[in-house]
Amino acid sequence: MRPGNGFAMFVVAIISSGPGFAACTPPRYATQLAEAAGELRLEAQSTLLRGLANSLRSALGDDNSVAKASIGGRYAIAAAGGLASSAYSETLDDYFCVLGEKLGADATKKALLNKERLAMRATLLKYFDAGRWQPENTEARDKITDALIAETSAPPLFNMAEIDAALPDYNFDTLKISEIFGGVKVGDLVGVGACGGLVYRSIRQIDPSVLADLQLVPVVISKWLAGDRASAKLDMWTFVSSQMSKQLTTASNIEKLTIDKPLISCIDNAAQAAEQKMEEKKADGSAHAVLTLQPSSVKS
């Protein structure tokens, strides 16, 4: 099977966006700004819950009022991949913003940096593509490995010492990141009884280790800009593969459910609540938005 068809849309989005090398700020996943990452957690939860609702609809079918079904965690793989690709791409942008300030003294250099930033973002999105990490898509993952074997280095674009001197030294506290993205507690993000507990159990399937290697981003940038693309891409694929393999394992648990329309409606409402809270968070800039749902009588 082929990776998800949404990849092309993601590529269009990243090519038309970017920091423009202006108003550089430290990555929000660095220790001093880690609390601000709650917005993306809500985004990941929304993605997960929409995927879960779609899985339930597919299992129920059009004509059944009640169905017994076993569902896996494919929706959790998609949510984790989206969370990770957003976090790594955003962090990449933050580093390139600083490089643009320090190395982009002329228009040619600035344009070159932006071109390489987009190339690295496209590579990350390809590696994190959720379709590639569905359990049966081993062939899609093997193709990346084969491509890496054939990868060749390119002429250096900048001197590595110059790049390393320009890259800022941010501190990524991976323990704190894990607490933020993995520390779902009763009453924190969802009511314990929401949708028969299915919302809570599903959110717990997002493995926060997908953000464990953010501190390696400047190392990869340095290798890439110094011409060693083969090594840079191998590093990128290694940490993506390691993290998403863990997510694949986490999401491989099969849960047997009694599915009906009220359960699906409950999950839809949970997704809508996450989306609403995410929009409120964007609007007011608060660091600690909390998503709460009333306990539901729906049983799974």
Image: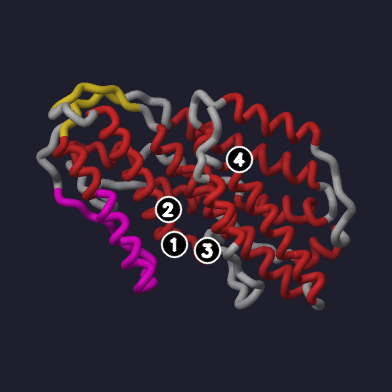
Q: Position of residue 39 (x, y in %)?
A: 40, 60
Q: Which residue: 35% across, 40% down?
A: 51
Q: Quadrant of the C terminus?
A: top left
Q: Which residue: 60% across, 30% down?
A: 140
Compared with residue 60, is residue 163 higher up or lower down, i.e. above or below?
below
- Colour convention: secondary structure
Report which residue position mark 2 lands on: 180
- What's the distance in space between the residues labelled 2 and 3, CA to CA? 12 Å
Of callouts 2 and 3, which one flags the residue occurring earlier in the amino acid sequence? 3
Of callouts 1 and 4, which one flags the residue occurring earlier in the amino acid sequence? 1
- What's the distance in space between the residues labelled 4 and 3, CA to CA? 20 Å
Label 4 vs label 3, nearer the camera: 4
Nearest the camera: 67 or 27?
Answer: 67
User: In the rendered image, which quarter is residue 199 located in?
Assistant: top left
Of callouts 1 and 3, which one flags the residue occurring earlier in the amino acid sequence? 3
The amino acid beneath tag 3 is Arg
User: In the rendered image, which quarter is residue 251 located in?
Assistant: top left
Report which residue position mark 1 lands on: 35
Please name the predominant secondary structure of the magenta segment in the image. helix
**Disc 2, SS:** helix
Report which residue position mark 4 lands on: 240
Q: Position of residue 181 (x, y in %)?
A: 43, 50
**Disc 1, SS:** helix
Do residues under tags 2 and 1 come within 8 Å of each other at their CB atoms?
A: yes
